[in-house]
Every structure is written in C-alpha cells, then in structure tokens.
Amino acid sequence: MSPTTRSDLPLNSGLKDTPSPSIDVLTARHVSLKHILVALLLSALFFLLFCFIVLHGYIAWVLSNPNVAPLYSNPKLSKNLAYDDVLFPAADGSRMMQGWYIPAEDSRKTIVFSHGYGANREEPWVPMYDLAHYANRLNYNVLMFDYGFASQKSKEVATGGNKEAEQLQGAINLAKQRGAEKIVVWGFSMGAGTALQAALTSEDIDGMILDSTFLLEPDTMYHNIRQHIDLPRRPSLEIIGLLLPVLNGTSMRQIPYAEVKSKDYPFPTLFIHGTEDEKAPYPIAEKLAENQTNDASEVWIVEGSHHEMIFREHPKEYLRKVSKFLSRIETGK
C-alpha cells in the first residue's frame, strides 16, 4: 500500500464547521445600533432645548420678582422730618399702596418720588432721604411710597411699568387730595420709565425729573441680560416675551414704550443721565429729550457718571440743576 500523502488527508480533520454570521443578522444589528444612536442624539437635543427654555423661564421669573430689601428707617429717624404713614389705592383700584407723606408748611406743591426696580421708597444708594430732605427744604410736600413689587405686606410681581403706572397715579391722586396744586414726579431708573408711562394719560403732572431713565423695551431688556449671560438676541427675546405674560400677567405689547419714545409731553421735563450708565444707555435720555418742545425741558448728560449715582457723584451740581428746574416750573418761565 502506498503511503498516504499530505494531500490525501481530510482538510477539516478533527475540526467542526463554524457557520459565518448571516448578512441579515449583521444588518439587523447595524439598524438597531443606528436607532439607539438616533434616540440618544434626540434625547440630548431635547434635554438641551429643555434647559434652554428653563434658563429663559428663570430670567423671566427674576425680571418679574426682584429681590427688594425691607425698610430700615423712616424720615424722622434719618432726617428728623415729621411724616404721616399713608395708605391709598392705586388709580385702577387693584391694590392698596403704602407710603410716607412729609408735609411742608402752608405748601400747595408736592413732589412724588418714583423709586426704581429692585428698590423700595428709601432707595439708599441714591440716597433718597437726602433728596426728600432737600425737596422739603424747598417747601415741597414729599410723598414717598412703595410700588407693589416692593411692598412688605402684599408683594406682587413687577410689570415694567404697566401696573406701576396706575400705582403712581394713585400717589398723584393722594397728593391732590392733600391740597397739591402743583405736582412734580421725580423718578429713578424704571421709576422714571413708569412716570413717562403714567404721564401719557395723567392730567395732573406739572413737571418731571427723570434720573437714569430705564424704559422696558426689547433693546434695553436684552442689553441688561447680556451683562449677566451671553445669549443670542433671537430667539431669546421671543422666548422671554412668551414667558413674561405667564409669570407676571403682562406682555411686552402692553408696555407703551414706542409711544413714550415719540411723545412730546406738555409739561417741563428734566432728563438726567450718566454716560457710564450700564443699565440704561444714555442715548435713551437724549432721544426722549429731543422730542420735547416745552421751553423749560432740558437734558443733563453727565460724563463718567453711573446708573442712579449722579447725585452721589455730583451732589452740588445736581441740586443746583434741580433747584433751577423747579423754580422754572413754579414761575412758568
């Protein structure tokens, strides 16, 4: 017998056949993996979208609910000024307002202070007590009050001047009831913007002093948001605009900023603004002042001054400007 050659040996001797994966199985695994990846990507996308909306909701909530410190003093303790605690309704009857009335002897003229956003009637950084004392020395009755968002007993949301304008008109009504024949509104920041809104319909204002005017509109809102977080203008403004009515009951369309920016008010107005105002750029005040045709209206743009800090930074010139302006209102010249 001839010896067995290598080529005669079985090729699979001692080995079991191992079947290869079918094409169908590989395809199924590929499709399954693809579905998982798509699901993960969609989940991540929806999560990021959810976080983006929540962030804007938080911004809208903060805008509507400013953190306001409690009152720490009163006119008597701060400046030895006699005063009355007053309670009066907003002009639309929506709520009761609290404040202080500081009388001047035999005076028929009253200054109503309109404080800013995130503050109460004291607004210590201005400082408001110093200006109230000065106004009283000029023989003005003084009314200081808290807007609803600053109330210690019945706090409500801030509405960019929409509801606050009715609250300011309520303070003006009280001044009239106390015998005022001339009423000057002295507003700060959003309190100045609120005064401009109230003056669109009020017939009881004889003059306004507007310090660091902040008017809530898309441009100024975005300007302030960008100082804290770098968000795209669109769709951020649109999202916040949709969320504001849900959180405070007021939409941007209810704030008459376009009308305010084009209004020629019939009474004298003194605009005071600093070039380093980081919250309300000073061209706002310049534009508002350009619209005024009353001979006694004027604008004072202070180089290098900051938001609501102009009196503190230039006290003598500030009081001189205010005194001269008030005398023009009184004399009608």
Image (spheres, rainbow, N blue to C red):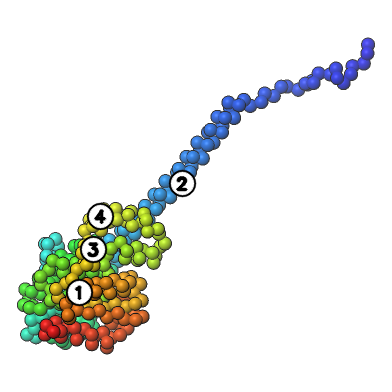
Q: Is residue 325 visible?
A: yes
Mark 2 to mark 4 CA distance (whole Å): 29 Å
Q: Nearer the viewer, mark 3 or mark 2?
A: 3
Residue 213 percent across, percent down from the top left? 26, 72
Mark 1 to mark 4 CA distance (whole Å): 32 Å
Residue 202 percent across, percent down from the top left? 12, 68
SS of the residue under disc 3: helix
Residue 106 percent across, percent down from the top left? 6, 85
Q: Is residue 188 visible?
A: no
Residue 164 percent across, percent down from the top left? 19, 65
Residue at the (29%, 53%) spot, across then down: 242
Mark 3 to mark 4 CA distance (whole Å): 19 Å
If you read the primary sequence from the N terminus, does the residue marked by circle 1 or circle 3 appear first?
3
Instruction: Determine contact: label 3, label 4, CB under 8 Å.
Output: no
Q: Which residue is mark 2?
A: 44
Q: Which residue is mark 3?
A: 258
Q: Which residue is mark 1?
A: 292
Residue at the (16%, 67%) spot, across then down: 200
If you read the primary sequence from the N terminus, does the residue marked by circle 1 or circle 4 appear first?
4
Q: Which residue is mark 4?
A: 245
Query: Within 10 angstroms of label 4, few (less than 14), some, or many (20 or more) residues?
Result: some
